[in-house]
Image (tube, rainbow, N blue to C red):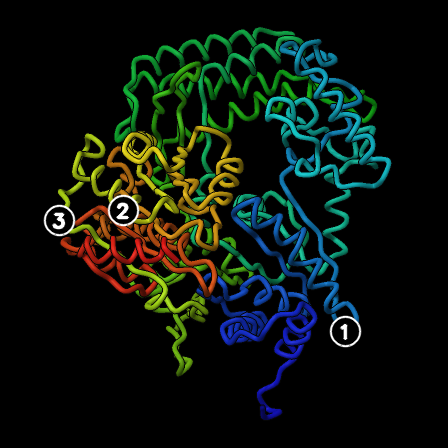
Amino acid sequence: MPEATTSPVRDLLATAVSALGGQERAGQVEMAEAVADAMTDGRHLLVQAGTGTGKSLGYLVPSLLHDKRVVVATATLALQHQLVERDIPRLVEAIGGVDGVDTSYAVLKGRSNYACLHRIREGVPDDQGTLVDVPEGSMAKKVLELRTWAEKQAQDKGTGERDAAPRHTDREWRQVSVGHRDCLGATKCPFGQECFVERAREQAQRSQLIITNHSLLAIDAIEGVPMIPDYDTVVIDEAHELVQRVTQAATDELASNDVDRASRRSQRWVEGSQADDLADAGDALADAISAASPGRFEVVPDQLKDALVLVRDAARACLSAFPKETSESEVDAGRTQAKGLVQEVFVNAERMAAGSDADVLWLSEGGDRIPPRLCVAPLQVWGQMRDKLLSDKTVVFTSATLMLGGDFSSVATSVGLKPSERVVESGAVSSGGDALPWRGLDVGSPFDYGQQAILYVARHLPPPGRDGLVKAQLDEIVDLVDAADGRTLGLFSSRRAAEAAAEAVRERLPHLTTLAQGDAQLPELAKQFVADPHTCLFGTLSLWQGLDVPGDTCQLVLIDRIPFPRPDDPLMSARQRAADKAGGNGFMQVAATHAALLMAQGAGRLIRTTTDRGVVAVLDPRLATARYGGFLKASLPPMWTTTDPAVVRKALTRLAGN
């Protein structure tokens, strides 16, 4: 190869791949060089890298070579764990001897992911804010085990991270951790010098590479709460989930029992009637919620609007009534938590009462032991991302699914980039000082989808209705599973549909093992699924994106219907309506884009290695008959396509016999 084609990033990547016993992959090299160029030029990059490309190394190598700090943000704990426990340590070991490469790295998570030594040593505030020890009972033994573990972590300079703790439930973990509102702060806490969160931040200050998650990135960059040391570039992996995660981070909730709890905790600290006034406002909110109908509010009822104003004003007055802290004041965790609860009620009530056109307000239905809650979320997040992240940092977005309908425009627009700002090969970009140039790159996949996979669209079936799976669909599922002799991952639009399909397969194909989401915890179900090829696993959304089962365990991926958002989804319906009002096509921009992302992720469960073979079967004829079907199919891997059920059953039978 001519010397002119070499580069530092290419050389270091080659060193790493060789040390790890791998082989050079053209897509990985192309990605690494594009990421390095983006970091150097300060130009945003969207890079689609199919499964098997090795995209982690494709962005980690240029990140370690960059002359300023880089943040890597993931959507899921699973990928974060893979990076921190496997990919980065192996890479550091492989290139540790290379001069001039800073291989330091750190992990940053939200505060509640770390044990709190103050809570462990001083106790947990009760409803009156008094610090008490954990009560006796079944939970006490586990909490004591967690305390012992945390003390050992503190002694050994460990991380105190939840992922490293003994097995526990959410309720048990809350007894040894705090959220941001309960934290006393490093300067006021008597155990601030030992604090696991502060240690993590100190490590991050000393590191070239920081691994975090989408939510923490959003809080730091978009909400302006400093959580991450200053950085130059952020690599957003699993970028197809970014909009949803940023939206979740910017969503607030309020229920009448939140107001009651804040009032009770305040009683001990507030001498006047302000805590009682807050309780009365909570009662008014409860009455207003009872009188309202669940769903999105196009116009907020007067009673609810008045109740929110009442809660806002009462919470403000209660906050003002808390005794002022002086430098000589003894820090009290109970007071800190009580004030934090009131502050949260105030902020949320104020936002909901404002009735901003930039927000969507709705009432959840509630359920068993779960009261209805008011929820407020941003109508869109692309504006905040553009103004507060993209205008300040260089951002690399990467995922196996960034091209929808064969183009980057949908995803680029959703994160705050304009299609007109895309840099084409000629280097042209729209004029204007506020333009944010970006490049889109598809580095392909090492898989030959045309040879390895079949896309089967069951065109002969009736369109899906509101009443769940009908007999024709259940018959089709049973026939396909029978031909595959198990080996089936079923991705369904609802829990009810997944359970109906599982029941039909169990009844008519009793020789196979059929598992349904909810039968056990997902890791246990996945383990059973992998252990025996003659097994089916049927489930809903968490299976669409998070399952990695290479080999003959999974040779058939069933998708019961195109996963459009529910028509009554308050946020999606509001976004669709807003797009229509702006002169766009709300259905295509919101509903079809949502469905395309999920279908691409779901279809991606099938081919995980170069030797995998199988079928993606879509039981929704609209993929073949509707006008938007072409957009959806163009978002999927380029599989060989058929609508002939006989051809597919023969193919599955042949695969099952191999």
Foreground: disc 2 or disc 1 = 2
Cα gap from disc 1 to disc 3, whole angstroms:
60 Å
Residue at horizontal 15%, vertical 43%?
463
Cα gap from disc 3 to disc 2, whole angstroms:
14 Å
The quadrant where residue 173 appears: top right
The answer to whether residue 633 is above or below residue 168 is below
The answer to whether residue 456 is above or below residue 370 is below
Residue nearest the observer in this picture, 7 or 215: 7
Regarding mark 1 in the picture, which secondary structure is present there?
Answer: loop
Foreground: disc 1 or disc 3 = 3
The answer to whether residue 375 is above or below residue 652 is above
Residue labelled with disc 1 = 98
Residue labelled with disc 3 = 460
Residue at horizontal 51%, vertical 23%?
345
Amino acid of disc 2 = Leu
Give the mark nearer the N terminus: 2 vs 1: 1
Checking the image for residue 611, the label placed there is none
Regarding mark 2 in the picture, which secondary structure is present there?
Answer: helix
Which residue in the rendered view is the most extreme toward the right? 155
Residue at horizontal 67%, vertical 35%?
162
